[in-house]
Amino acid sequence: MTISEKQTTVIVGGGHAAGALMTILLQKKYQHEVVLVGEEPHPPYQRPPLSKNYLAGEVDQASLYLKPRVVYEKAGQQLRLGVRVEQIDRDNKTIRLSDQSTLKYDQLVLATGSHVRRLRAPGSDLQGIHYLHDITDTDALREKLVPGKRLVIVGGGYIGLEVAASATKKGVNVTVLEAADRLMQRVTGPEMSAFFYAKHRGAGVDVRLNTAVTGFEAGDQGRVAGVTLADGGTVPADVVLVSIGVIPETALAEAAGLPCDDGIVVDEFARTGDPDILAIGDCTHHRNLFFEKMQRLESVANAVDQARTAAATLMGEEKPYDSAPWFWSNQYDVRLQMVGLSQNSDQRVLRGSAEDKEFAVFYLREGSVIAVDAVNLPVAFMVGKQLVQHRKSVCAKALSDPRTDLKSLV
Amino acid sequence: MGKITFIEHDNTEHVTEFEAGTTLMQIAVDNAVPGIDGDCGGECACGTCHMIVADEWFGKTGSIGDAEEQMLSMTPERAQTSRLGCQVRTTEAMDGMTVHLPEFQM
Ligand SMILES: Cc1cc2nc3c(=O)[nH]c(=O)nc-3n(C[C@H](O)[C@H](O)[C@H](O)COP(=O)(O)OP(=O)(O)OC[C@H]3O[C@@H](n4cnc5c(N)ncnc54)[C@H](O)[C@@H]3O)c2cc1C
Ligand code: FES
């Protein structure tokens, strides 16, 4: 094969997973032509700051980018931004783009991410109802966060709560409405939920649990004026943020006949049902050898770890995905770091106390550590990473005893 | 504008140019230095940007914060002059600095 017949690898989607893959391929000196096609006008960027310091106005847009656009291009990688992939023609190994051009691929990597779950209820198309998923959404919301305004957040998950913290910092009056009986119920245990409840209440946020939303009330000129509740009440609002989760972006894959089931189905090597098509990140329902079952995760760690796996697969190496998931969240002066998934624990062990503002919850199952949530205690997170990855059995008493050096348990 | 050299565990050298104000992690990422991915984007939350600063330059890198110290304390290849690259903001005084990379990240 001559140089001009170099194979082409196309990456669809310009998010965190796609960006990480570009960088890893460069580090590994991948020899194929690499082209990224992304719908957003930005080079791959980090979403975590969107609800945190970017919303609070503490960092600028350029700092969100994984790296500046020129860095990819200087290294010979192509970015086609502001263009959407409309269709995959697997027979001819070609994709069709929204600018009506086509692109041939030898290998295709789908990194299409997720989109927000919309709340369908009376009044849900009123102006002033926001969602938060990309830079455009964040800029629009940030503009509305002026001191004294009333922001009502539907959904007490980590994104809703991070926005509550960022908006409170800006002098906005915030109410959080959560249908469940505790905050962040999907991702953490009751002790953490209680801690964050107290934290937000203490900062002046009106957090209401067991509160189901039924719709929105209209004010002047088609603008939202309030959120209506199942108990008949109304919460007045100038701005509303709905933050009730995301849905994997699978339309393209489904139309191409690739197996999908709550995400694009991939094996532990990031391979879809088509040997020339891989998928990574939020859009996948994947096999991670760390778990016994198929899993869908929405996190930067998952995006990056799957990118590592995909890079290895593209280069003919076998590096199965087998790492424990981890996550972080910043709210006020609280740094929460989590590793593992805590849902199936049968025992919870507290180390330190919430009053000290530095504590951790270890989640055990049959005596082994399956997850750790650490508040302002990075060492517990780092120790937890080791314990969880190796499913270490530890004595609950030793974990909670402040005289035990956590590091000695690894 | 100055130069910083990153040396991989297998002694491969990467001479990079930097603008003061950029973090060591970001410089490594921008130059595709293998082994530095900076998963959390510089939040001091992941520990995947461990670097070992050459002894004579360590004093120029500023002090280690409490969170950084806790993260580093669990790093197997921890050295006297270890830093998390995302916590070191470069200054003009770092022109010519050498930084070593560990074999593995956390
Ligand atoms: C506000 C917010 C805060 C977050 N905070 C954290 C956090 O603290 N920690 C953490 O671990 N995770 C956090 N996350 C989650 C994390 O950002 C995601 O898990 C991660 O971005 C997933 O990366 P991805 O590449 O799979 O998807 P995305 O980053 O969503 O990227 C997908 C990209 O593909 C593009 N695309 C989709 N379809 C097409 C198409 N057909 N053609 C072209 N382009 C297409 C989309 O426009 C998008 O840009 C947060 C997310 C949000 C929104
Ligand atoms: S980049 Fe995550 S700790 Fe430095």
Image: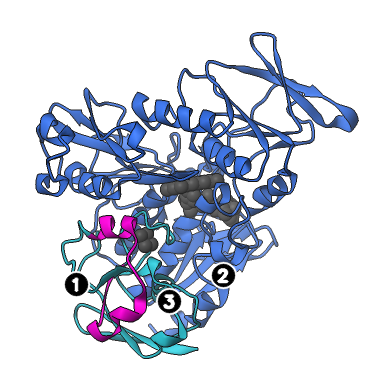
Chain colours: A blue, B cyan
Q: Is residue A106 above or below residue A149?
A: below
Give the amino acid at mark 3. Ile
* x, y percent for residue A354: 34, 32
| Boundaries of the magenta span | B50-72
Q: Is residue B44 magenta?
A: no
- Can you tell which of label 2 and label 3 is closer to the viewer? 3
Viewer can see residue A93: no
Quadrant that contains the N terminus of chain A:
bottom left
Q: Are marks 2 and 3 in contact (CB under 8 Å)?
A: no
Q: Is residue A306 above or below residue B5?
A: above
Q: Secondary structure at mark 3?
A: helix
Compared across the picture, whether A207 is left or right of B29 comes to right
Circle 3 sits on which residue? B27
Q: Secondary structure at mark 2?
A: strand
Q: Is residue A130 above or below residue A237?
A: below
Q: Whole-Å distance between the Cαs marked 2 and 1?
A: 41 Å
Q: Whole-Å distance between the Cαs marked 1 and 3?
A: 22 Å
Give the amino acid at mark 1. Gln
Q: Dot 1 surroundings within 10 Å: few (below 14), some, or many (20 or more)?
A: few
Circle 2 sits on which residue? A79
* Residue A402 disc label: none
Circle 1 sits on which residue? B80
Magenta-drawn stretch, dominant element (helix, strand or loop): helix
